[in-house]
Image (cartoon, grey):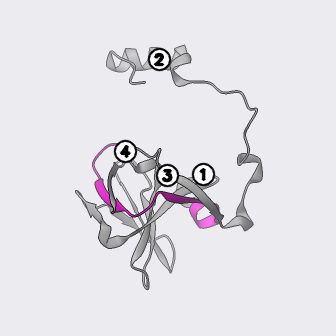
Protein backbone atom coordinates (compact mmCIF):
# COMPACT_ATOMS: atom_id res chain seq x y z
CA UNK A 1 0.00 0.00 0.00
CA UNK A 2 1.57 3.33 -1.04
CA UNK A 3 2.34 5.79 1.73
CA UNK A 4 1.03 9.33 0.96
CA UNK A 5 3.82 11.71 1.92
CA UNK A 6 3.56 15.50 1.66
CA UNK A 7 6.40 17.83 0.82
CA UNK A 8 7.17 21.34 -0.33
CA UNK A 9 9.73 23.92 -1.28
CA UNK A 10 11.28 26.11 1.43
CA UNK A 11 8.76 28.95 1.03
CA UNK A 12 5.73 26.65 0.74
CA UNK A 13 4.54 27.95 -2.65
CA UNK A 14 5.04 24.53 -4.24
CA UNK A 15 3.42 21.70 -2.24
CA UNK A 16 2.94 18.12 -3.27
CA UNK A 17 1.83 14.74 -2.02
CA UNK A 18 3.59 11.68 -3.34
CA UNK A 19 2.29 8.15 -2.92
CA UNK A 20 5.54 6.41 -2.07
CA UNK A 21 5.79 2.65 -2.64
CA UNK A 22 8.93 2.23 -0.53
CA UNK A 23 11.35 4.37 1.41
CA UNK A 24 14.42 3.52 -0.63
CA UNK A 25 16.53 6.49 -1.67
CA UNK A 26 19.90 7.12 -3.26
CA UNK A 27 22.59 9.77 -3.43
CA UNK A 28 23.37 11.17 -6.86
CA UNK A 29 26.87 12.59 -7.33
CA UNK A 30 26.76 13.28 -11.09
CA UNK A 31 28.05 16.66 -12.25
CA UNK A 32 24.63 17.66 -13.60
CA UNK A 33 23.10 17.21 -10.12
CA UNK A 34 26.06 18.86 -8.42
CA UNK A 35 25.76 21.94 -10.58
CA UNK A 36 21.98 22.20 -10.47
CA UNK A 37 21.88 21.93 -6.65
CA UNK A 38 25.17 23.61 -5.74
CA UNK A 39 26.00 20.61 -3.57
CA UNK A 40 28.38 17.65 -3.65
CA UNK A 41 25.43 15.25 -3.92
CA UNK A 42 21.67 15.12 -3.64
CA UNK A 43 19.36 12.56 -2.05
CA UNK A 44 16.55 11.34 -4.30
CA UNK A 45 13.72 8.84 -4.09
CA UNK A 46 12.20 7.44 -7.25
CA UNK A 47 8.41 7.57 -7.67
CA UNK A 48 5.88 7.17 -10.45
CA UNK A 49 5.01 10.56 -11.95
CA UNK A 50 1.33 9.61 -11.76
CA UNK A 51 1.73 9.21 -7.98
CA UNK A 52 2.74 12.85 -7.46
CA UNK A 53 -0.06 15.35 -6.89
CA UNK A 54 1.19 18.94 -7.13
CA UNK A 55 -0.97 21.44 -5.21
CA UNK A 56 0.75 24.13 -7.27
CA UNK A 57 2.59 23.16 -10.44
CA UNK A 58 6.34 23.61 -9.94
CA UNK A 59 8.53 25.63 -12.23
CA UNK A 60 10.59 23.44 -14.57
CA UNK A 61 14.24 23.95 -15.47
CA UNK A 62 15.35 22.47 -18.80
CA UNK A 63 18.61 21.21 -17.29
CA UNK A 64 19.97 19.22 -20.23
CA UNK A 65 18.96 17.75 -23.58
CA UNK A 66 17.57 14.71 -21.73
CA UNK A 67 16.08 16.02 -18.47
CA UNK A 68 14.04 18.66 -16.68
CA UNK A 69 13.97 19.55 -12.99
CA UNK A 70 11.07 20.82 -10.89
CA UNK A 71 11.93 23.74 -8.59
CA UNK A 72 10.42 26.84 -7.01
CA UNK A 73 11.33 30.10 -8.75
CA UNK A 74 10.58 32.07 -5.57
CA UNK A 75 12.90 30.30 -3.09
CA UNK A 76 15.08 28.21 -5.42
CA UNK A 77 14.35 24.83 -3.84
CA UNK A 78 15.32 21.88 -6.01
CA UNK A 79 12.42 19.41 -5.97
CA UNK A 80 13.52 16.64 -8.31
CA UNK A 81 14.54 15.29 -11.66
CA UNK A 82 12.81 13.60 -14.58
CA UNK A 83 13.74 12.46 -18.04
CA UNK A 84 12.02 14.33 -20.85
CA UNK A 85 11.02 11.09 -22.57
CA UNK A 86 10.73 7.40 -21.94
CA UNK A 87 10.04 7.06 -18.24
CA UNK A 88 6.89 6.94 -16.14
CA UNK A 89 9.02 7.64 -13.05
CA UNK A 90 10.72 10.70 -11.65
CA UNK A 91 12.92 11.52 -8.67
CA UNK A 92 11.89 13.75 -5.77
CA UNK A 93 14.42 15.30 -3.42
CA UNK A 94 14.33 13.54 -0.06
CA UNK A 95 14.85 16.78 1.86
CA UNK A 96 11.76 18.39 0.31
CA UNK A 97 9.44 15.91 2.06
CA UNK A 98 7.85 17.28 5.24
CA UNK A 99 9.27 14.24 7.06
CA UNK A 100 12.30 12.81 5.26
CA UNK A 101 13.21 10.50 8.16
CA UNK A 102 11.65 7.28 6.73
CA UNK A 103 13.96 7.30 3.71
CA UNK A 104 17.00 5.04 3.72
CA UNK A 105 19.89 5.39 1.26
CA UNK A 106 20.39 2.21 -0.78
CA UNK A 107 23.06 3.18 -3.32
CA UNK A 108 25.19 5.91 -4.89
CA UNK A 109 24.81 7.06 -8.49
CA UNK A 110 27.24 9.11 -10.56
CA UNK A 111 30.14 7.65 -8.59
CA UNK A 112 32.65 9.01 -11.12
CA UNK A 113 32.05 12.51 -9.64
CA UNK A 114 31.81 11.45 -6.00
CA UNK A 115 33.62 13.63 -3.44
CA UNK A 116 34.53 10.90 -0.98
CA UNK A 117 35.75 13.28 1.72
CA UNK A 118 32.12 14.38 2.16
CA UNK A 119 30.69 10.87 2.57
CA UNK A 120 32.15 9.78 5.90
CA UNK A 121 32.14 12.79 8.17
CA UNK A 122 32.20 10.74 11.39
CA UNK A 123 34.43 12.41 13.92
CA UNK A 124 33.86 15.96 12.72
CA UNK A 125 32.71 18.39 15.37
CA UNK A 126 28.91 18.58 15.58
CA UNK A 127 27.03 21.73 16.52
CA UNK A 128 23.29 22.06 17.03
CA UNK A 129 21.55 25.19 15.73
CA UNK A 130 19.98 25.75 19.16
CA UNK A 131 23.49 25.95 20.65
CA UNK A 132 24.61 28.79 18.34
CA UNK A 133 23.61 31.93 20.22
CA UNK A 134 24.41 34.31 17.35
CA UNK A 135 21.88 32.48 15.15
CA UNK A 136 19.26 32.40 17.90
CA UNK A 137 19.69 36.14 18.48
CA UNK A 138 19.26 36.90 14.77
CA UNK A 139 15.99 34.87 14.67
CA UNK A 140 14.67 36.54 17.80
CA UNK A 141 15.57 40.02 16.52
CA UNK A 142 13.92 39.30 13.14
CA UNK A 143 10.80 37.39 14.21
CA UNK A 144 10.50 37.44 17.99
CA UNK A 145 11.22 33.70 18.37
CA UNK A 146 13.70 30.99 17.43
CA UNK A 147 12.02 28.37 15.18
CA UNK A 148 14.30 25.50 16.25
Q: Circle 3 is placed at which residue position?
A: 103
| CA distance for labels 1 and 3 | 19 Å
Helix, strand or loop under label 2: helix
**Residue at 66%, 67% in the rendered image:** 110
Q: Circle 2 is placed at which residue position?
A: 136
Residue 27 locus on image (x, y percent)? 60, 58
Residue 30 shown in magenta:
yes
Dot 1 or dot 3: first in sequence order is 1
| CA distance for labels 2 and 1 | 25 Å
**Residue at 36%, 54% in the rendered image:** 72
Of badges 4 and 1, the one in the foreground is 4
**Residue at 30%, 45% in the rendered image:** 12
Can see residue 76? no
Dot 2 or dot 1: first in sequence order is 1
Q: Which residues are magenta?
A: 11-33
Dot 3 or dot 2: first in sequence order is 3
Residue 16 locus on image (x, y percent)? 29, 56
Q: Circle 1 is placed at which residue position?
A: 39
Amino acid sequence: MPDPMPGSCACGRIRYTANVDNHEAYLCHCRMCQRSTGSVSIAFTNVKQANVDWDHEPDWFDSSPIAVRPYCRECGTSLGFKFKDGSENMDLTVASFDDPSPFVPKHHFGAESMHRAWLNTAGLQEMRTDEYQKLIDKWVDATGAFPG
